[in-house]
Image (spheres, helix red, strand yellow):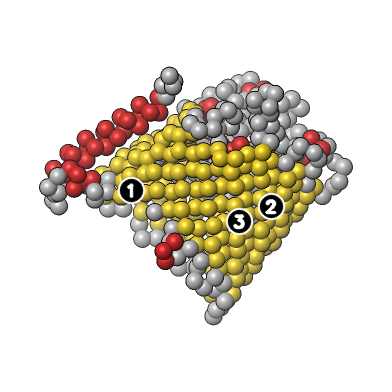
Amino acid sequence: MKSFKPQNLILGLSLLFTFTFLGYGQQNQRDTSKSLVGFIKKGKLSFHSRTYLMSTLNEGKGNDFFTLANGNIFSYETPIFHGFQIKTGGFLSFRLAEYNLIDSETGQWTKNRYEKALYDTKHPQSKYNLGGLDEVYLSYLHQGISFKLGRQAYKTPLLNKNFNRLRPNLFHGLSAKYQLQKVSISAAWFASEAVRGTMETYAMSNSFGVYGQGRHPSGLNNDYHGYINTHGTGILGFQYEEKNWKTQAWNFWSENVFNLSFLQSDYTLKLNSTKLLFGIQGLYQTALNNGGNNDPTHAYMLKNESTFAIGGQFALEFIQQHKISFNYLGISDQGRYLFPREWGREQFYASQTTELFEGYGGLNAYVLRYEYFSKNKQHTSIISGGVIDQPSIDNLRLNKYGLDNYYHFLIEHKYHFEKYMKGLSLRFIATYKKEIGQGVMTAQQKLNKVDMINLNLVIDYKF
């Protein structure tokens, strides 16, 4: 007999609540239907299927990995009535094929880093029962003011759904947004999260360290997962947009752990068929109280630790199809920039797939990027290369994950089908990372970090 799963009860109750609420709603519509079925048919049913082929090639025997996966997300949105709307959905994913992901003796994951995030990183033997809830929330909209209560995706430059595997991060709580013509103000409070790459829902306090914890400045391995004391995470955002100018400011308050402020401003100067783009980013972060725990061996940040970072972009866009940009990020050596990787993927100008800047201080990243957009908008391509100047791997105060200086190259192409195949898209991504100073890192330290290639072929179908 299969074990009972609480999420199945939650899904059933949410569906029951949805249809009960729908029944009430259809009786109170000005545009009422003659039946509940007729009202339900006015809602929106969505489907997203993703087939994902991934392989990582490392130096040395037995260090290559491969997998083929499929994930499907189903969702239903009710019609809006009196400003209210309910969305409910679920997902189901499958491990179709794999090579060298599971240790035959222990039954645990091998040392693969990227592939296992397609599945359940905490239960390596789970292959066919990878299902659960997707977004489930009640929303309300009235004259530019909107609220969402429940399990939801959320978008900021740092905390976001990070939907680059089979399912996204989903956050549990209340969010609000006030939208004017040029200005929007956002606020949210999240108490828990369904972390991408797991089948679990974690209190925000327990989401720290789900993916890994890195090294403590004392030289020991970090040990903060399960020890962080916080009631949740608050977010406040401000966005302003003119025709040629966009600015956004965000504050992330992880109660009792840290506070981080982020600012970005982008300006576009049009010169006939050519555009010059200028952008600047900045952040400042400081620990709150004792960084999450009175015992420094279990704290996420050191007491009184703080840092700041600044980023920039200069870009040239011409013939409406080509864009060349120079991108930079510098993080102060005053302290480490720390933001739980479980909460999303950072969106710095210098960001590239397969690696993050989180966990480092005293870092300088330089990235040159070329982007191509076809006139029919079906083809997009990216070619980029970067030099990442890290603090020494022996500098435990500033280098959390033990990564040396490296080159980082990316090739990406995406094709959107049209007409009969509209909704289908193909995406190919290849990254290569190479250690700059040979001999600094051991073979074990290099694994899945540098001197490696990561290949991805993603097939998406949406309707």
Could you tell me the amino acid type at mark 2?
Thr
Residue drawn at x 58%, y 28% as measured from the top left: 125
Q: Position of residue 312 (x, y in %)?
A: 64, 58
Distance, label 2 to label 1, CA atoms, is 36 Å
Q: Are marks 1 and 3 in contact (CB under 8 Å)?
A: no
Amino acid found under the numbered disc labelled 3 = Phe
Q: Quadrant of the N terminus?
A: top left
The disc at residue 375 is none
Q: Secondary structure at mark 3?
A: strand
* Mark 2 Cα-neighbour bin, 10 Å: few <14, some 14–19, many ≥20: many
Dot 3 surroundings within 10 Å: few (below 14), some, or many (20 or more)? some
Residue type at mark 1 is Leu
Q: Nearer the viewer, residue 28 or 277?
A: 28
Q: Residue at x 69, y 45 (%)?
A: 56
Q: To which residue does mark 1 refer?
A: 45
Label 1's element? strand
Q: Is residue 188 left or right of residue 386?
A: left
Q: CA distance from mark 1 to mark 3?
A: 28 Å
Depth check: give the residue in front, 411 or 302: 411
Tell me where residue 438 appears, x and y as whole percent.
Answer: 86, 46
Mark-to-mark CA distance, 3 and 2? 10 Å
Q: Position of residue 306 (x, y in %)?
A: 64, 38
In the image, which is nearer the foreground, mark 2 or mark 1?
1
Q: Is residue 358 visible?
A: no
- Residue identifier under label 3: 428
The answer to which image quadrant residue 272 occupies is: bottom right
Which residue is at a point 21% across and 35% down the rendered structure image?
Answer: 20
Does dot 2 land on a helix, a strand or a loop? strand
For label 2, the residue is 431
